[in-house]
Image (cartoon, rainbow, N blue to C red):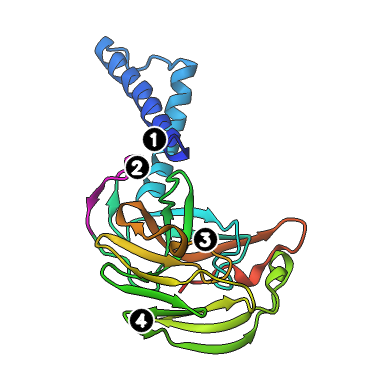
């Protein structure tokens, strides 16, 4: 069990609900319906519905995340604030992450948030490139799935602004994964890890779109299905402190 924000949110909801509910039962038992609530009960009464709504929204509908690194460039930039669909891959209980309702499974090309297998207290975001049973290969900066090279279309060189200028000049390609077309970055002259991998059942092979600047399944292996948090689908804010501030043209971007 991770003692993170979700844990304390659940604990606060349960404690405030227990205090307020206990007071109501005590008052009903005494028959003094109009009795004034003590200050500590008033606080519980005020906080409980707010905490409950936040808990339900965050656990079962959507959760906000901030992009801290450039591993998913050019799709996601440092400073993007995104929304993640929490029910796409099934309904899970908060804190324990036990799945109680099966809905759908990740598809090739999905952008997923997951708990990092080597440290589940840390959330990562990458793109699914390999499904259970797939044979994944990466050679000469080219991705192969089940023996077939993934289709690439040259787009020129990347030109960024603000905190993302450090990747200016990287080669840009449009990559096609199933029905999903998205952009990737390749750094010329930078060595990259190579090899072949077979994705076990119940696992997913993930990679960053910034292929030469991503700590992903090529280094530490596939992601267990149990570690999935949700599917990223929307950029609701972009903020770069000290540089550009709010970048309005990224707000409202639907992720593919």
Numbered label attached to residue 10: 1
The earlier-in-sequence mark between 4 and 2 is 2
Left or right: where does residue 65 sit relative to residue 230?
right
Residue 181 falls within the magenta-colored stretch: no
Left or right: where does residue 39 sit relative to residue 199?
right
Numbered label attached to residue 1: none
- Asked if the residue at tag 4 contacts the one at tag 3, i.e. Cβ–Cβ closer than 8 Å, the answer is no
Which residue occupies 37% across, 66% down? 205
Q: Main secondary structure of the magenta part?
A: loop
User: CA–CA distance between discs 1 and 3?
Assistant: 31 Å
Residue positioned most to the top: 30
Q: Badge 2 is on which residue?
A: 94
Q: Is residue 84 above or below residue 252?
A: above
User: CA–CA distance between discs 3 and 4?
Assistant: 23 Å
User: CA–CA distance between discs 1 and 2?
Assistant: 8 Å
Q: Badge 3 is on which residue?
A: 215
- Asked if the residue at tag 2 contacts the one at tag 1, i.e. Cβ–Cβ closer than 8 Å, the answer is yes
Q: Is residue 169 above or below residue 98?
A: below
Which contiguous range is marked in magenta? Answer: 93-102
* Image coordinates for residue 45, horizontal then vertical, percent: 42, 27
Mark 3 residue element: loop
Q: Nearer the viewer, mark 1 or mark 3?
A: 3
User: CA–CA distance between discs 3 and 2?
Assistant: 27 Å
The earlier-in-sequence mark between 3 and 2 is 2
The earlier-in-sequence mark between 1 and 2 is 1
The earlier-in-sequence mark between 3 and 4 is 4
- Asked if the residue at tag 2 contacts the one at tag 4, i.e. Cβ–Cβ closer than 8 Å, the answer is no
Few, some or many residues within 10 Å of mark 1 (<14, 14–19, 20+): some
Q: On the image, which quarter does residue 132 sit in? A: bottom left
* Image coordinates for residue 242, horizontal then vertical, percent: 77, 57
């Amino acid at each position: 069990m991770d003692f993170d924000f979700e844990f304390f949110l659940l604990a606060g909801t349960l404690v405030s609900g227990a205090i307020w509910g206990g007071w109501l039962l005590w008052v009903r038992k005494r028959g003094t319906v109009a009795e004034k609530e003590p200050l500590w009960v008033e606080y519980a009464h005020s906080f409980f519905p707010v905490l409950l709504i936040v808990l339900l929204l965050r656990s079962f509908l959507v959760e906000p995340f901030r992009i801290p690194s450039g591993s998913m460039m050019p799709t996601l930039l440092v400073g993007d604030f995104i929304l993640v669909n929490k029910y796409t891959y099934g309904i899970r209980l908060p804190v324990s992450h036990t799945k109680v309702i099966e809905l759908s499974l990740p598809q090739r090309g999905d952008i997923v948030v997951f708990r990092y297998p080597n440290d589940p207290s840390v959330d990562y975001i990458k793109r699914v490139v390999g499904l259970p049973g797939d044979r994944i290969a990466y050679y000469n900066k080219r991705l192969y799935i089940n023996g077939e090279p993934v289709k690439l279309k040259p787009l020129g060189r990347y030109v960024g602004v603000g905190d993302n200028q450090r990747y200016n000049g990287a080669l840009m390609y449009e990559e096609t994964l199933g029905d999903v077309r998205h952009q990737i970055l390749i750094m010329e002259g930078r060595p990259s890890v190579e090899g072949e991998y077979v994705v076990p059942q119940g696992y997913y092979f993930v990679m960053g779109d910034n292929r030469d600047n991503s700590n992903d399944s090529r280094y530490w292996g596939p992601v267990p299905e149990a570690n999935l948090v949700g599917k990223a689908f929307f950029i609701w804010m972009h903020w770069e402190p000290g540089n550009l501030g709010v970048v309005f043209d990224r707000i409202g971007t639907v992720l593919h």
